[in-house]
Amino acid sequence: MPDTSCLMTGATRTYPRYDHLPILLVYSPERGRRLLARLRDTRPLFVCTVAHTETAEIDGISGAGATAALRRLTAAADVEALFHGRPLCMDGVPSNPGGAPGPVIITLAGLRMAGLDVVAFDAGLRVQPDAPITRVADRWGDSIATGRAVPHAADLFARGLDHGARLAGLSGALVLAESVPGGTTTALSLLCGLGYDAWDKVSSSMPGNAHAQKSAVVRSALAAAGLDDAARQFSGLGVAAAVGDPMQPFVAGLALAALPRVPVLLAGGSQMAAVLALMVRLATEHGLPFDPEAIGIATTRWVANDPTADLAGLVAQVADVPVFASDLDFGRSQYRSLRRYEDFLVKEGVGAGAAAITAALLTAAGQDTLLTAIEAVYREIYGAAVE
């Protein structure tokens, strides 16, 4: 039975820490301690998969970019920032409509502190980044409203298996991150299509979440695909092809191929819960090994404590794998736009939580040290004086 001692009690969410570091053990803490002890002895490879889904064009469901036009640039800008320290296709980093800068500034700070190398994959973009990236698809995802969002899901999964086996030979562990605007809506649709109760449980880059709108879009998508018909049988890849996004089958392939060889951190919140669910289904269908001792989900405190979501509850439905959260605190930041994170804007993305966790794990950095490093990246990009 999973250890649920760290789950939400009443209206308050309290979690134990790992070894006095700013790392919260959100779900399955004992298994989480064992995994973090393994990761402490290695220097993971950071792998970011980016993609575009036309689902992000639906008004009101994504805050990963101030406008629909800018959301088309978000993933490319995030990759450019990972390699160049700042985006080249826009001024500043992709920002939330509420004014908070995108999470790639957290990722950059964490990667620099931990000294991690970066590999990037293009699983289908509208805008190509000016950065070293391996292209694994020549088309982006359609809207889930069509019921045929990723018809090439099987090919993406196969490519993920190939690259995952290769990458596992390059490092002692993999951190698998993503940048996909609209991805929490496609996470909801994938989870529900796979049979999980994810309604009103996925997080969002916006403070109030948009559960009513997301749910309406997803119910329509499931109906368009025929997934609302209990008599119809869909494979895991069939569900991803109908109502997923391109990142999901590719990262599921990366992780499943790597797991027999090295530990894997799925870097994100709701979107990685969906990838985990797809992995579990595909491992069963394809006879692939799945070791819950070697995999975990790494996110941020803002996702773990999101009052409009329930990440731990989602993962508990899927598998007994640990969930970690970086205990970042921007409440004391000298920059007003960073303090907006404490209003539950943005929360996560581009592996921000995992990068901060890895930095803390490998350097013993505390909250203040992490914040100082993140503010330094913010100043590099914006040249900002104290706000």
Image (tube, rainbow, N blue to C red):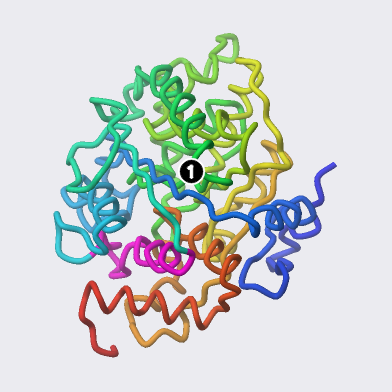
Query: Image quadrant for the N terminus?
Result: top right
* Residue on which the image places disc 1: 271
* Residue shown at the point (32%, 69%) measured from the top left: 100
| Quarter of the view holding residue 140 | top left
Callout 1 secondary element:
helix
111 on left or right of 5: left
Position in image of residue 65 (x %, y %): 26, 55
Magenta-colored stretch includes residue 345: no
Packing grade of label 1 (10 A; few <14, some 14-19, many >=20) is many
| Quarter of the view holding residue 23 | bottom right
Comparing 159 with 343, the one in front is 159
**Does 164 sit above or below residue 380?**
above
Position in image of residue 198 (x %, y %): 57, 40
Query: Image quadrant for the C terminus?
Result: bottom left
6 on left or right of 182: right
Magenta-colored stretch includes residue 98: yes
| Quarter of the view holding residue 336 | bottom left
- Magenta segment range? 93-114
The kind of residue on which mark 1 rests is Gln
**Does 41 sit above or below residue 143?**
below
Position in image of residue 9 (x %, y %): 75, 62
**Does 65 sit above or below residue 290?**
below
Comparing 249 with 134, the one in front is 134
**Residue lying at the far bottom of the rendered structure:** 386
Position in image of residue 268 (x %, y %): 50, 50
* Residue shown at the point (57%, 26%) measured from the top left: 194
* Residue shown at the point (64%, 21%) measured from the top left: 288
